[in-house]
Image: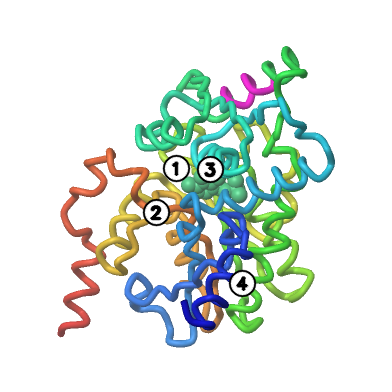
Amino acid sequence: MTLLDNRLAESFCVREDGLAAHVGNTPLLPLRRATFGLPQAVKVFAKAEWFNPSGSVKDRPALNIIQTALANGDLTSGKRLLDSTSGNMGIAYATFGAALGISVTLTIPASASPERFAILRALGAELILTDPTEGSDGAIVEARKLAIEKPDLYWYANQYNNPANWQAHYKTTGPEILEQTESRITHFVAGLGTSGTLMGTGKYLREQLPDVRIIAFQPDASFHGLEGLKHMPTAIKPGIYDESFADETLEVRTEEARAMTLRLAREEGLFVGISSGAAMVAALRVANKLKDGVIVTVFPDSGDKYLSDVPLWESPLPVGAALSLSKREG
Ligand code: PMP
């Protein structure tokens, strides 16, 4: 071994930065083709959150919730972390739980995608399935019940009411976007699930750039196909959500989000989940009204967890895509 090899080995061995050190600092990708027809001075970017270790935006709040609970002495050894999830938060808890030796119990609607169940089982999480017709609210009610019934067994992470959720975005997503856009962001667009992404990122950006517009979006109806998002008027309102916070709240239909998800795959090479398609619909709605501006949205996860949705991926090329291709070629 040379002296140099020795030094490299030493520096490698002392770096105990594990998975947690790789949460955040995700790429900010420009959308170039799905934005066809917008004025030159209007730019749209998306935070590619599937670059996080467990594959979604939820690594940020999951890690911060766990680290805060460990630091405060709330999550003591022998207790199981309990929470409700629509999938991604559970996968993030299960990932860091496995890495840190914390057992995880999740209440989850039985309608979550088979890919999510397979990943959660692979990571060793205990799953309690709830009524699919009650959506994410059914899982919340079940988690609350278990937390009350067995306080000695569970530490209830309560992502919908835990400030460490939005604070994760305040500490990381917001500063990253400010830096990556060199403070040129004019509009931030985010979907509402727990609302952590919108509230934390939006709060940071508004403090730094008081003129920035914060735009929320949600599904247009209580029954919808936008996994991870909530129709706030008919759902249990998350404690961390302030409905007066956003400058505007848009509604996105499941069908337009699905069509856009396919366009992102075929026109941008971005194989993302359906809430990312919804984010792009909302971002384009904002962009279409501008003459100039820098719009940033968040693509929460990749398409992997939706692969069993065969009708989505095997549709013919959407009309919009064919149009923009022929225009460019002409
Ligand atoms: N999209 C997906 C796929 C999600 O899993 C989530 C989290 N539930 C969101 C969007 C919304 O994020 P937030 O909880 O921060 O509002």
Mark 2 / mark 3, whichever is N-terminal = 3
Residue 136, image x and y in percent? 55, 30
User: From mark 4 to mark 2, how far is it between C-alphas?
Assistant: 20 Å
User: From mark 2 to mark 3, how far is it between C-alphas?
Assistant: 17 Å
Mark 1 / mark 2, whichever is N-terminal = 1
Residue at the (49%, 78%) spot, across then down: 5
Instruction: Say what amino acid the circle numbered 1 marks.
Output: Leu
* Residue at which label 4 appears: 177
Residue at the (77%, 32%) spot, across then down: 76
Instruction: Say what amino acid the circle numbered 3 marks.
Output: Thr
Q: Is residue 318 magenta?
A: no
Mark 3 Cα-neighbour bin, 10 Å: few <14, some 14–19, many ≥20: many
Query: Magenta residues, as a range?
Result: 138-144
Mark 3 / mark 4, whichever is N-terminal = 3
* Residue at which label 1 appears: 226
Residue at the (41%, 37%) spot, across then down: 119
Instruction: Say what amino acid the circle numbered 4 marks.
Output: Ile
Is most of the magenta stretch helix, strand or loop? helix
Mark 1 / mark 4, whichever is N-terminal = 4
Q: Which element carries disc 4, helix, strand or loop?
A: helix
